[in-house]
Image (tube, rainbow, N blue to C red):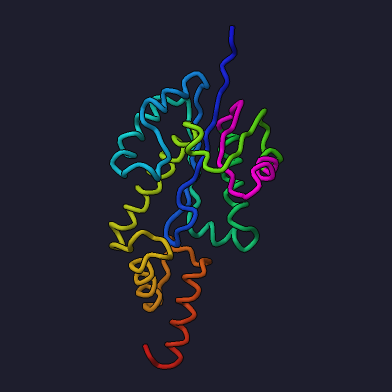
Amino acid sequence: MVNTKLVAGIDEAGRGPVIGPMVIAGVLIEDERVHVLYDLGVRDSKRLTPKRRERLYPEILKEVKSYHVEVVDAKVIDLERGRKNLNVIELEGMAKIISKLRPDLVQVGSIEFKTEKFRDKLLRRVEVPEIVSAHHAEDLFPAVAAASIIAKVTRDRLVAKLREIYGDFGSGYPSDPKTVEFLRHVINRGELPEFVRSSWGTVQRIVKLSSCNTRSGLY
């Protein structure tokens, strides 16, 4: 009798935005059923439309043995970045997921240039038989692609709720002019919502400029 290996795929969504949480997701599936994810059309979430991701979300949950999601809010990121960088914050989130899922094998994308170094850092934090870390893991491992969809859909839903309350602030990325304009507007009003990552350089530059303009009597 062949022993079934439990495979965990892990990925994140929302690492770079200045608005909203970072979401890390992990799915646990039997290795002999990984092909089912591929047959469903599971791919890297960035290669799928929002509607396609939403359709795949419940189908993935039906096929996997278990899953776990870690939501790292903006205010937590800001607090933690006073003591550690974003890589460590993400690493800790991944370790929590592995501890919850208890897989035989972990497949995960490397958040560092040297994949072996990142794998070893993760291995020092969790008890797991094997970790495979690779760049572009979403394209290599269906379980990681499934996790990327779970993470992306979860984050998109959370951000959609924020838009219902605060209006259209664009994509939430620092490169988006609509996002920058939203940040200027709330900061110039003396507000900084807790879902904004105040430790991001974009926010700090706007705060500094607003403060200078206020002292100059421009506002």
What x and y, as percent, mark residue 96?
59, 40
Q: Is residue 112 magenta?
A: yes
What x and y, as percent, mark residue 31?
52, 22
Q: Residue at x 38, y 25 (%)?
A: 39
Q: Residue at x 68, y 38 (%)?
A: 123
Q: Nearer the viewer, residue 19 or 32?
A: 32
Q: Is residue 189 magenta?
A: no
Q: Quadrant of the N terminus?
A: top right
Residue bounds of the magenta highlight: 101-121
Q: Nearer the viewer, residue 168 or 132?
A: 132
Q: Residue at x 41, y 28 (%)?
A: 38
What x and y, as percent, mark residue 65?
47, 24
Horizontally, residue 13 falls left or right of residue 49, namely: right
Q: Residue at x 40, y 93 (%)?
A: 217
What x and y, as percent, mark residue 117?
69, 45
Q: Is residue 1 above or below residue 15?
A: above
The quarter of the displayed image where residue 21 is located: bottom left
Q: Residue furthest bottom?
A: 217
Q: Nearer the viewer, residue 118 or 184?
A: 118
